[in-house]
Image: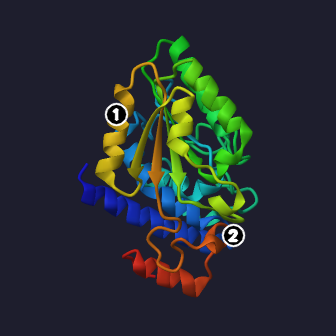
Amino acid sequence: MKNEDLAKHAAHVRRNIVKMLTVAKSGHPGGSLSVTDILQVLYFETMNVDAARPDAPDRDRFVLSKGHAAPALYATLVEKGYFPEEELWHLRQCGAMLQGHPDMKHTPGVDMSTGSLGQGLSAANGMALAARLDKSARRVYAVCGDGELQEGQIWEAAMSAGYYKLDNLTVFVDHNKLQIDGTNDEVMSVMPIAEKFRAFGWNAVEIDGHDYDAIRGALTAAKAAVGKPTVIVAETVKGKGVSFMENQVGWHGKAPNEEQCVLAIRELGGEA
């Protein structure tokens, strides 16, 4: 897929993120917008998935460990054809399919229920081990938040993945440098990320998480890394694409109002 086509998908996804959070009056725009470009490359170029067969045994698996970025995943699944766009406007409503965090039991295309930070990488490890035992070529992809790396379970899982040489596992760290209480450095520094993973036996790549060519190249390198899981440390901008949200910690978990929604959608190339 051409970069301009990926950019069109990403812009539509970002507009839908803003719209659905405005309708829901709650949610997490900052980290959803920062991870959007990564998801477009995964779903439209990299992963072996089929919306018509969401439970296919040999599909690649995806774990959104930073589950609060569910709006980005939902909007991407819509873009890929898993369910109608209309479902987005019921986000976070009682009885609706799309809840505040991913639910594998009720949402087509969601492989793991997540939300309690720190647990997703362990689940991804299990999926990667299962693929090996099945002698399957399926691969496992996960996205963790940078603040999430403050969870101890992440590093237990990192040690385990390195020990078992899970080279069918690729993890993105969405390094937007902000979390709910401030900057990573203010709360608890997670640096140096790549070096820490390397110490646990991982292949580590550092990229611009909004550069499609860089994302592509890192994923190619991950497939070529034999005997090691790969972590891709993606340098991103929280609130990417909306000027008044970019690099603003206050937009971690706050929904835009109607006026802000209009402004954001216009900035993202749409009509509100």
Indicate the colouring scheme. Answer: rainbow
* Dot 1 and dot 2 residues touching (CB under 8 Å): no
The answer to whether 245 is drawn above or below residue 196 in the figure is below
| Residue 221 badge | 1
Residues 91 and 66: in front is: 66
- Helix or strand or loop: what does disc 2 sit on? loop
Counting residues from the N terminus, which is met first, the one under dot 1 or under dot 2? Answer: 2
Q: Nearer the viewer, residue 248 or 264?
A: 248
Q: Residue furthest right?
A: 94
**Can I make out residue 102 in this image?**
no
Res 25 quadrant in image? bottom right
Q: Residues within 10 Å of mark 1 (few under 14, many from 20)?
A: some
Q: Position of residue 246 (x, y in %)?
A: 51, 72
The quadrant where residue 218 appears:
top left
At 58% from the left and 25% from the top, the residue drawn is 161
**Along the horizontal axis of the image, is 9 left or right of 247?**
left
Side of 224 relative to 178 (left or right): left
Identify the amino acid type marked 2. Answer: Ser
x then y, percent, for residue 173: 53, 47
Specify the label residue 88 is tagged with.
Answer: none
Q: Secondary structure at mark 1?
A: helix
Residue 268 image position (x, y, % from top left): 40, 74
The residues bearing labels 1 and 2 have C-alpha atoms spaced at a distance of 38 Å
- Where residue 183 appears, as percent x and y from the top left, is 63, 64
Q: Residues within 10 Å of mark 2 (few under 14, many from 20)?
A: some
| Residue at which label 2 appears | 26
Q: Residue at x 50, y 41 (%)?
A: 194
Q: Is residue 49 placed above or below 269 in the rendered structure?
A: above
Q: Nearer the viewer, residue 181 or 51?
A: 181
Under mark 1, the amino acid is Ala
